[in-house]
Amino acid sequence: MVSRSGRRNNWWLIWISTIWLLWNRRNNVVFNNGRVYLNKLFDNIILCALRWRKTQGRKFSTLFFE
């Protein structure tokens, strides 16, 4: 079981990942005439959060249906 503060930190990390990737993709669209694919965006948000959590040496154990 994950503690309440651990869950809060995981959701915070997902939020930060979302903002970061939206900003990054927006810049790609504006400056490089790129495209955004929502299915890939969602996958990249989760992947980014997992990678950032891994660099902190912690497990990412929040289930998304909680």
Image (cartoon, grey):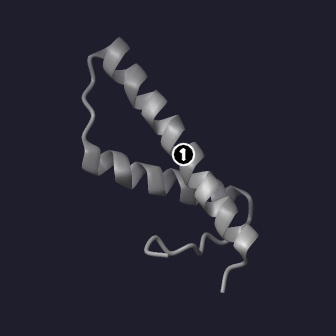
Residue that appears at 49% across and 44% down: 18
Determine the image quadrant of residue 11.
bottom right
Determine the image quadrant of residue 8.
bottom right
Q: How many marks?
A: 1
Q: Residue lying at the far top in this picture: please name it.
A: 31
Label 1: few (<14), some or many (≥20) within 10 Å? Answer: many
Residue that appears at 57% across and 73% down: 62
Left or right position of 64 against 1: left
> Label 1's element?
helix
Q: Is residue 58 visible?
A: no
Left or right position of 13 against 4: left
Residue that appears at 47% across and 38% down: 21
Q: Is residue 7 visible?
A: yes
Query: Does residue 42 sit above or below 54 in this rendering?
Result: above
Query: Does residue 53 sit above or below 19 in this rendering?
Result: below
Quadrant containing the N terminus is bottom right
Q: Which residue is mark 1?
A: 17
Determine the image quadrant of residue 7.
bottom right
Residue 54 in percent (x, y) is at 65, 62
Residue that appears at 75% across and 68% down: 5
Tell which of 6 and 32 is nearer to you.
6
The amino acid type found where label 1 is placed reads Ser
Residue 58 in percent (x, y) is at 71, 68
Left or right position of 16 against 39: right
